[in-house]
Amino acid sequence: MNREHYIPFDKEFLLDEQLAEYAGDEKQVEDFKKLFDIIEHYYHHEAFNLIRNIKKNYAFFDPDLPAKEREAFKGKSDFSVFKDTLIKVLELSNYSKVSQEVLDKAFKDSDLIGLKLDIDLDVYKDYEIYVRGQHTAKEKVTKYFFWKKKIEVEYYDRVMIYLKYHDADYYKKKKLKKHKSLIEPGTVVLKIFKRVPKNDLETIFPNATPKMSLTDKLLLWVPGVVGGISLLSAKVIPALIKMQAAYQSGETIDLLNSKTSLNQGLIALGILGAYLFRQYNNFVNKKIKYSKMLSDSLYFKNIGNNSGAFYSLLNSSEEEVLKETILAYSFLNRSKIPLSADELDHQIESWFKTKHNTDLDFDVKEALQKLKNSDLGIKTNGKWKVIPLEQALIRIDEIWDGVFDYSKLASN
């Protein structure tokens, strides 16, 4: 698995971990708690402004709004601003875009459902999938009829799908009726899921429908055609021909032998029919399993839809930015000498690897930029240091005081 910027630990857990590093100095512990608290509130304020921006510019494309209400936002919602803001929030949340190569592999392979899905991608004007966090788990799957086998399945912890539909004229021109009820022309659908198998990403598309694979078709039709022709030519047809010939010539029909031969053929055809039914039933069972997986995704794995997805994303972005900033500050504050970006990056990544057995790619560039923007971090000759905790609290308090500075307006 590729290393990610995503930090798979709760912010409160990381706060406790950093406080433990200051153990023995009560003032440092209290000051660090205060700094953490005020930075958290400041980033929450920034996220609030982001959500106002993104909701306003998404309203015209929101399928959850009635058509008349959406129309009121025509000319007010700017799609390019919405998309740029969405990408920014995804980056802050440490989501990464799934490449077409990975998506094509998911369309081709399947870890759990073992079923080919048909997805008409022409329904969408644009589609993108973003993921965050990966882990593997052992799962039991059916292989070769009744043989159960344990396999290692790779999961994404979070998956967001972005779907942009064409305008109504496109669907009229294409005379598209399939999945018509799922389409709201001109809208943008956003969905966030948890714990989605990497090779089953296609299951989160709303218009994914099961289809028979080549193997399913061969198992169903080849034995049926070959076996049926063989039984008919060897048993049933000869018995019927013999009975017909005897009837026409007036010969005595050996009913016992003819009936026995005919019954044997019909019984064999019945067995063949049972086999074909079983094979088709296997396919139906796969469809049922897929439906259950889809149901699980909708009711148990889905954690946000459309405008509701923003809150999940913004909460994630707040946490990730906070964790990165506070870790960078803490490590620089405890360092006896200034550190280069690479040195700081190595220290933090080594700490996660050694103490928590976690291999991640810490986003040191974003963390240092946040420290610089708030004047908490100072860069001199390629080396970074931070101002002491007492001064940091004063500086953050000044930033907060400037957020709602209406005194200048009053004086004017």
Image (cartoon, helix red, strand yellow):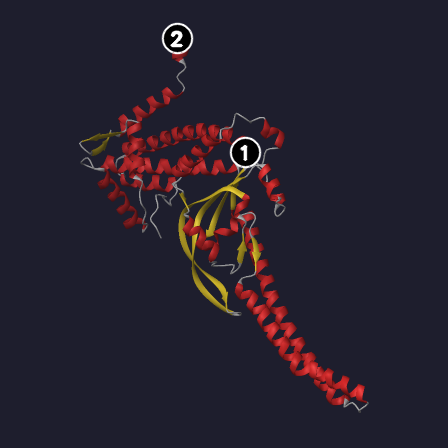
Q: Is residue 182 left or right of residue 238?
A: left
Query: How far across and down, in percent of the image, does residue 313 sit?
Result: 45, 38
Q: Circle 1 is placed at which residue position? A: 61
Instruction: Give the quadrant of the C terminus.
Output: top left
How many badges with numbers are in the image? 2
Closest to the camera, between mark 1 and mark 2, is 1
Give the crowd class for mark 1: few <14, some 14-19, many >=20 residues within 10 Å. many
Tell me which amino acid carries mark 2: Ser
Q: Are marks 1 and 2 in contact (CB under 8 Å)?
A: no
Label 2: which secondary element: helix
Q: Could you tell me which residue is drawn at 48 percent across and 31 percent down?
A: 54
In the rendered image, the residue lying farthest to the top is: 412
Label 1: which secondary element: helix
Q: Circle 2 is placed at which residue position? A: 411
Of mark 1 and mark 2, the one earlier in the sequence is 1
Can residue 144 be seen here? yes
Q: How far apart are the alpha carbons under marks 1 and 2?
A: 42 Å
Q: Nearer the viewer, residue 163 or 9?
A: 163
Q: Could you tell me which residue is drawn at 31 percent across and 42 percent down?
A: 362
Which picture quadrant has residue 136? bottom left
Q: Is residue 24 left or right of residue 406?
A: left
Q: Is residue 271 above or below residue 87?
A: below
Q: Nearer the viewer, residue 54 or 377?
A: 54
Tell me which amino acid carries mark 1: Phe
Q: Nearer the viewer, residue 98 or 145?
A: 98
Query: How far across and down, in percent of the image, does residue 214 sit?
Result: 53, 64
Can residue 198 be seen here? no
Which picture quadrant has residue 94? top left
